[in-house]
Amino acid sequence: MVNETTAQETAWAIASALPDPEIPALTIAELGILRSVELMEGVITVSITPTYSGCPATEMIKGDIETALRDAGFSAVAVRLIHSPAWTTDTLSAATLEKLRAEGIAPPHRGQAPHCPLCGSSAVEQIAAFGSTPCKSLWRCITCREPFDHFKCH
């Protein structure tokens, strides 16, 4: 039988490698959605925090975690939502912000307009409050004329 620590570490490794359904270049761990993995009384319990209340990807993330862990041999899996502390873009690492930029998504910047992730220009205009997903807004670069998503600050 696998010990608790090994089971938790294995389950964490599996869950943390899952891509976010709306930004597949990032994992749910990189986005800070994955909060904890615990083994209690034979049940692997994974705690996640959605990026915002009502996030349409939450149910897909829960299903992806359950499927991945069951496929790895964990028979008893529970995924629970925790809302405190709330998820915030303030906790995103510099590496995660750079991955967003590399994907053509302007990373969140509190109190200032984004820079174009394609050419770096600060000459940008907002086209719509919502972009390809509700957690992003749609912008256009005045310099290179390309549209881009901006990950909103939360």
Image: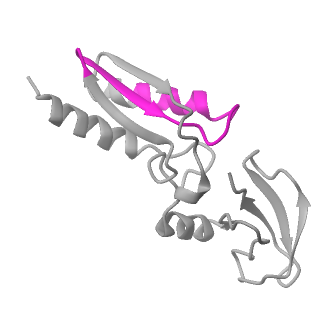
Q: Residue, x 24% and y 38% (percent of image)?
A: 10
Residue 94 image position (x, y, % from top left): 50, 69
Report whether 40 appears left or right of 154.
left
Residue 75 image position (x, y, % from top left): 29, 16
Residue 110 image position (x, y, % from top left): 70, 65
Residue 73 image position (x, y, % from top left): 25, 24
Report whether 96 appears left or right of 37.
right
Quarter-wise, where is residue 97 in the image?
bottom right
Which residue is at the front of the view, 83 or 98? 83
Q: Residue, x 60% and y 32% (percent of image)?
A: 58
The answer to whether residue 74 is above or below residue 127 is above
Q: Residue furthest front?
A: 85
Q: Residue, x 30% and y 29% (percent of image)?
A: 38
Which residues make up the magenta segment? 40-67
The answer to whether residue 80 is above or below residue 128 is above
Q: Residue, x 16% and y 29% (percent of image)?
A: 4
Q: Is residue 57 magenta?
A: yes
Report whether 110 appears left or right of 144.
left
Which residue is at the front of the view, 129 or 21? 129
The answer to whether residue 107 is above or below residue 119 is above
Report whether 104 appears left or right of 99.
right
